[in-house]
Image (tube, helix red, strand yellow):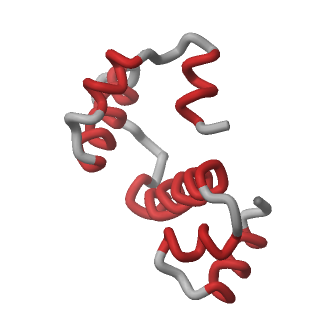
Amino acid sequence: NTFISELKKEGRINEEFLDTLSEFTIEELLTLKLEVSSRMFNGKLYNMMLWYNMPFIVRESLLDFVDRNCKTKMDMANTLGLPYDNFIQIYKKYNK
């Protein structure tokens, strides 16, 4: 199952949401998510160490994407643009 199909089944998203979502760049989506998340803290996200953690957050999202959308580990490695041996090490590190 794709993440989209899971969220649709849960009633959390629909095609209209996906159409709107497709109009944004990844950078814009991250900015929106950070801004919405910061609202409950009056515009601040203290102690989150975003600058240092963002690469890990993005990599985990990429691994989740390929895990859901690729059939083989070789396909996953190719989608990410990684040599297969490097991908296997990373895949094991993230316990996927």
Task: Please give the count of numbered marks on the rendered protein.
Answer: 0
Identify whether 20 is placed above or below 33: above
**Is 10 left, or right, of 25 in this rendering?**
right
Q: Residue at x 29, y 25 (%)?
A: 19
Quadrant in the picture for the N terminus: top right
Q: Quadrant location of residue 21?
A: top left
**Is 66 left, or right, of 40 in this rendering?**
right
Q: Position of residue 91 (x, y in %)?
A: 71, 70
**Is 24 left, or right, of 86 in this rendering?**
left
Q: Position of residue 58 (x, y in %)?
A: 47, 57
Identify whether 82 is placed above or below 73: below
Q: Position of residue 84 (x, y in %)?
A: 64, 85
Instruction: From the viewer's side, name the closer residue of 57 and 13.
Output: 13
Q: Quadrant location of residue 70?
A: bottom right
Quadrant in the picture for the C terminus: bottom right
Q: Position of residue 95 (x, y in %)?
A: 79, 62
Q: Residue at x 30, y 48 (%)?
A: 26
Q: Residue at x 47, y 17 (%)?
A: 13
| Residue sitting at the far top | 11
Identify whether 31 is placed above or below 6: below
Instruction: From the viewer's side, name the closer residue of 40 and 20.
Output: 20
Q: Residue at x 72, y 81 (%)?
A: 89
**Is 48 left, or right, of 23 in this rendering?**
right
